[in-house]
Amino acid sequence: MSPSTAAPGRWQLPGGSVEPPQDEAVLDDPALAGQAARELAEELGIGTAFEDLKLWVVTRGENGSVGLTYLAPALSEATLRADFTAAAAAERAQARESELDDIALVRSPDELAVLAGPHADYLEPVVRHFSECRRGQTPERKSRPSSSSSATPQATGSSGSSGPPG
């Protein structure tokens, strides 16, 4: 994340805080998925329709925050990196700092261990759960939305000094 984000210098999933609904809009499942899709576009340059995102897991952070993690359709590593590079270049062209300095594609908690720098408190449990589900060790859980959103558990991003394929 850039120095101006809520968690600068940490490896974390792309995401952000939930924006309050405008006017008489309802903050329901589609609205939350829409915000997660917006974060994917802003931070990774990935255009995904909110209908294509699947609410996958809900976490609670050390500070009491609630995070919603969505699964996005799988993309190749080359596509993820190209989209991220293009999004970062577009931010720089507008004299803005990109929210993510780098991305790392991880499939297991062991792969997190090699990422230098601090990690968001939810990252290891989410990646562990993702890894277990991929191996068929843990049934997927259905969760209800709460108050915060993030996007896919396949790509983590970092900011500051830190530097899965589909």
Image (cartoon, rainbow, N blue to C red):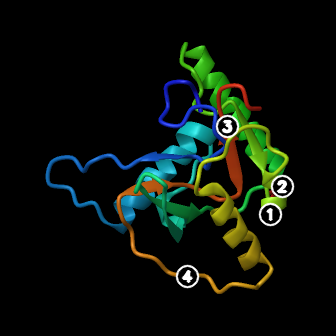
Q: Secondary structure at mark 4?
A: loop
Badge 4 density bin: few <14, some 14–19, many ≥20, Cα 10 Å? few
Q: Which residue is mark 4?
A: 141
Q: CA distance from mark 4 to mark 3?
A: 27 Å
Total marks shown come to 4
Which label's residue is closer to the chain start, 4 or 3? 4
Q: Secondary structure at mark 3?
A: strand
In this rendering, the answer to whether 88 lies above or below 39 is above
Disc number for residue 30: none
Q: CA distance from mark 3 to mark 1?
A: 17 Å
Disc number for residue 158: 3
Q: Residue at x 58, y 46 (%)?
A: 14
Q: CA distance from mark 2 to mark 3?
A: 15 Å
In this rendering, the answer to whether 90 lies above or below 17 is above
Query: For the residue marked with disc 2, what is the amino acid?
Result: Glu
In this rendering, the answer to whether 53 lies above or below 40 is below
Q: Are marks 3 and 1 in contact (CB under 8 Å)?
A: no
Q: Which residue is mark 1?
A: 108
Foreground mark, 2 or 4, reads: 2
- In the image, taking residue 24 as reference, residue 89 lies left or right, namely right
Residue 117 lies, in percent from the top left, at 73, 37
- In the image, taking residue 53 as reference, residue 31 lies left or right, namely left
- In the image, taking residue 30 as reference, residue 76 lies left or right, namely right
Q: Residue at x 39, y 68 (%)?
A: 145
Badge 1 density bin: few <14, some 14–19, many ≥20, Cα 10 Å? some
Q: Which residue is mark 2?
A: 111
